[in-house]
Image (spheres, grey):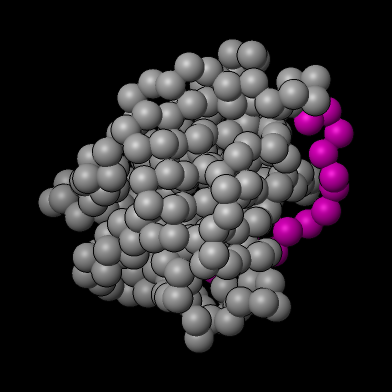
C-alpha cells in the first residue's frame, strides 16, 4: 500500500481522518477543480460557553448507530477538491472512509484499507483506541484549564446557508470551537464550526479553518438503519 495513505488511515478519530486525508487527497490531486467557496463567519464571538454538551455530542457520535454518505471539500487559494465520505457506526463496529482510504473497526481492533488498482487491500488487525480513551482525549482538548480550544455559540445563519436541503438547523446542535492560541495542532485547526444530528447523533457538518485553507465536511444522506454492506470499505 501507499505509505502516505497508510499514515492517513492511521488517524482513527473521524475528525483527524477527515482533516489529514483531505490534505493527502489535495497533495495527490494534480488539477483540483477551481471555484470559490463561501465560509462560516470568522468574527470572534463574545464569551465562551460550557464545553460539556459538545463533549457529550462527540461521545454520542462515536457510539450511536447510523450510516451516512457525505463529502469533504478542501479549498485553498481559490481552488478546491471534493472527495466522497462514508461513515458507519453500529455497536462496536465502525467504518470511516474518505476517498480511497478507510479505517474499519471491529471491537478492540482496526484495519487500515486502501483501494489499489480496483481492489481494496487491508492491513492485518491492530489495536484500536477505546471509546473512553478517545472521548477523554477530545475532552482534554476543549475542557482542561489549559485546553487548546474554547467553545462558543455558532453563527447559525451561516451554517444554514451551507447545509444541504435535507438537513435543517432545527434538527441539529452546533458549536463553534476556536483555538486558544495561534498554531494549535489539534482536532479543529484554528477555527471550526461543528454540527451533530439530534436524531442519530451523527456529525453532519464541520467547517474548519487551518491557516489559509478551508476544509468543509457535510452529510448528503443519513439513516439510522445499518446493513452489513455499510461496514465494508469500497474505496470511494
Comparing 140 with 130, the one in front is: 130
Q: Residue furthest bottom?
A: 170
Q: Is residue 74 visible?
A: yes
Vertical arrangement, residue 70 with respect to residue 114, above or below = below
> Where's residue 4, x and y in %?
60, 18
Q: Which residues are magenta?
A: 29-43
Q: Would residue 175 be found to the left or right of residue 51 on screen?
A: right
Predominant SS along the magenta part: loop
> Where's residue 171, x and y in %?
50, 81
> Where's residue 31, x and y in %?
86, 34
Comparing 140 with 95, the one in front is: 95
Count of numbered tags: 0
Q: Residue furthest left?
A: 145
Which residue is pictured at 20% across the width and 55% down the height?
Answer: 143
Is 39 a magenta residue?
yes
Q: Would residue 41 be found to the left or right of residue 145 on screen?
A: right
Quarter containing the N terminus: top right
Q: Quadrant of residue 51?
A: bottom left
> Where's residue 152, x and y in %?
34, 69
Which residue is pictured at 58% across the width and 54% down the height?
Answer: 227
Which residue is pictured at 68% across the width and 64% down the height?
Answer: 220
Is 47 a magenta residue?
no
Comparing 33 with 172, the one in front is: 172
Q: Quadrant of residue 106?
A: top left
Amino acid at each position: 500500500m501507499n505509505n502516505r495513505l497508510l499514515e492517513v488511515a492511521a488517524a482513527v478519530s473521524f475528525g483527524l481522518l477527515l482533516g489529514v486525508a483531505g490534505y493527502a487527497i489535495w497533495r495527490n490531486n494534480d488539477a483540483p477543480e477551481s471555484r470559490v467557496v463561501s465560509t462560516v463567519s470568522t468574527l470572534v464571538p463574545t464569551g465562551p460557553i460550557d464545553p460539556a454538551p459538545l463533549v457529550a455530542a462527540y461521545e454520542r457520535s462515536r457510539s450511536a448507530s447510523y450510516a451516512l454518505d457525505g463529502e469533504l471539500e478542501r479549498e485553498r487559494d481559490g481552488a478546491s477538491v471534493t472527495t466522497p465520505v462514508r461513515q458507519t457506526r453500529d455497536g462496536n463496529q465502525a467504518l470511516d472512509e474518505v476517498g480511497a482510504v478507510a479505517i474499519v473497526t471491529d471491537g478492540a481492533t482496526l484495519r487500515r484499507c486502501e483501494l489499489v488498482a480496483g481492489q481494496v487491500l487491508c492491513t492485518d488487525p491492530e489495536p484500536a483506541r477505546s471509546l473512553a480513551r478517545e472521548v477523554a482525549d477530545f475532552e482534554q482538548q476543549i475542557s482542561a484549564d489549559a485546553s487548546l480550544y474554547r467553545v462558543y455559540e455558532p453563527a447559525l445563519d451561516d451554517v444554514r446557508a451551507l447545509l444541504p436541503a435535507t438537513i435543517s438547523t432545527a434538527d441539529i446542535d452546533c458549536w463553534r470551537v476556536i483555538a486558544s492560541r495561534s498554531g494549535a495542532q489539534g482536532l479543529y485547526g484554528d477555527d471550526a464550526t461543528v454540527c451533530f444530528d439530534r436524531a442519530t447523533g451523527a456529525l453532519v457538518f464541520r467547517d474548519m479553518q487551518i491557516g489559509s485553507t478551508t476544509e468543509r465536511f457535510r452529510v448528503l444522506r443519513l439513516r439510522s438503519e445499518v446493513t452489513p454492506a455499510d461496514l465494508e470499505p469500497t474505496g470511494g
